[in-house]
Image (spheres, grey):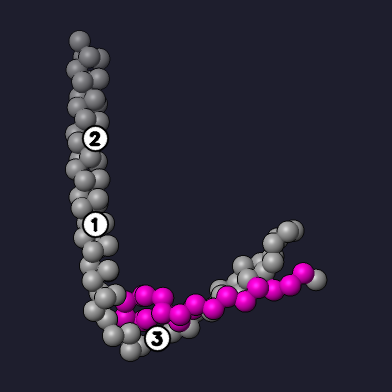
Amino acid sequence: MKKENLLKQKNGEALLLAKSYKELKKRETKLSTQLLKTRTLLQQVCIHNETKIVNDYTPAGYLDREVYVTKVMCKTCGKELDRKEVTGGFG
């Protein structure tokens, strides 16, 4: 009898945790949607007066060429304002 009560108690904890997890996932989805809407609105309203240049490099593979990417990003909203890609040659 004690073993059954102990199992029910442990399972009860798991059920409470599962319920809490589901509620948190639901809140996460709602907050993720709000974040996306807010970021989209911010990028539409922002005047992009402060920018930064971000350089990126993708090395060449056996059959691929290397790619150098230069992006101009807004510091305020994070929107990519300009992008230039330069592809390297073989050898």
- Residue name at image x 31 percent, y 80 percent: 76
Left or right: 67 as drawn, with respect to 50: right
- The amino acid type of the residue labelled 1 equals Thr
Q: Which residue is mark 1?
A: 33
Is label 2 in a helix, a strand or a loop?
Answer: helix
Foreground: disc 2 or disc 3:
3
What separation in Å lies between label 3 and label 1 (alpha carbons)?
26 Å
**Where's the C terminus, which quadrant?**
bottom right
- Residue name at image x 65 percent, y 73 percent: 87
Q: Disc 2, disc 3: CB below 8 Å? A: no
Question: Of the numbered discs in the image, which one, if any, rests on residue 18?
Answer: 2
- The amino acid type of the residue labelled 3 equals Thr
Left or right: 35 as drawn, with respect to 58: left
Marked residue nearer the N-terminal end (2 or 3): 2
Task: Give coordinates of residue 28: x percent, y percent.
Answer: 24, 51
| Residue 86 drawn in magenta | yes
What separation in Å lies between label 2 and label 1 (alpha carbons)?
23 Å
Question: Of the numbered discs in the image, which one, if any, rests on residue 51?
Answer: 3
Write the start and end of the magenta stretch as one range.
Answer: 71-90
Task: Give coordinates of residue 71: x percent, y percent.
Answer: 49, 78
Marked residue nearer the N-terminal end (3 or 1): 1
Chief SS of the magenta region: strand
